[in-house]
Amino acid sequence: MLNYPVVPASQSRPLGATSSRITTVLVSAATAAAWIVWRQYRRWKTARELHALDDRMLHDIGLDRSEIDSVVNSGFTDRRALEVLGR
């Protein structure tokens, strides 16, 4: 036998309140997912642009080719990375 709690009708939530909450949660989840996809796209694009530069140009902006991925994935918290990428 299943033991579900019995909730009197006077204490139950209206269906509209529940569906409104579900809608809010779904919109929040979709927004968060879109933001993650956007950030990953920007990182990929930045890495692609930096990899397209020759070694001399990378040296001019203070980067070594081996540092590109770490600079891109650092979240641009380093001031030098921000200046290098013009952001």
Image (tube, rainbow, N blue to C red):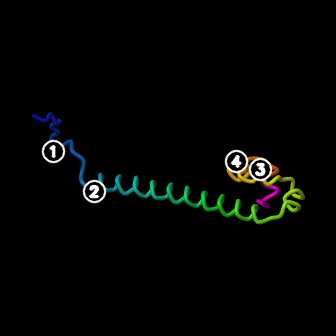
Instruction: Please name the residue that numbered disc 3 is placed on.
Output: 67
**Kind of residue sitting beneath label 4:** Ser
Instruction: Please name the residue that numbered disc 4 is placed on.
Output: 74
For residue 9, which numbered disc appears in the image? Answer: 1
The residues tagged by marks 1 and 3 sit, at their Cα atoms, a distance apart of: 63 Å
Q: Is residue 41 left or right of residue 61?
A: left
Which label sits in the foreground, 4 or 1?
4
Quadrant in which the C terminus is drawn? bottom right
Instruction: Please name the residue that numbered disc 2 is placed on.
Output: 16
The residues tagged by marks 2 and 4 sit, at their Cα atoms, a distance apart of: 44 Å
Q: Residues within 10 Å of mark 4 (few under 14, many from 20)?
A: few
- Front position in the image: 38 or 64: 64
- Per the rendered image, the range of residues in magenta is 82-87
The residues tagged by marks 4 and 1 sit, at their Cα atoms, a distance apart of: 54 Å
Image marks 1 and 2: residues in contact by CB distance under 8 Å: no
Image marks 2 and 4: residues in contact by CB distance under 8 Å: no
Which image quadrant for residue 54?
Answer: bottom right
**Kind of residue sitting beneath label 2:** Gly
Q: Going from the N terminus, do you reach mark 2 or mark 3 first?
A: 2
* Disc 1 secondary structure class: loop
**Kind of residue sitting beneath label 1:** Ala
Name the residue at 17% across, 43% down: 10
Which label sits in the foreground, 2 or 3?
3
Q: Going from the N terminus, do you reach mark 4 or mark 3 first?
A: 3
The residues tagged by marks 4 and 3 sit, at their Cα atoms, a distance apart of: 11 Å
Q: Position of residue 72 (x, y in %)?
A: 71, 53
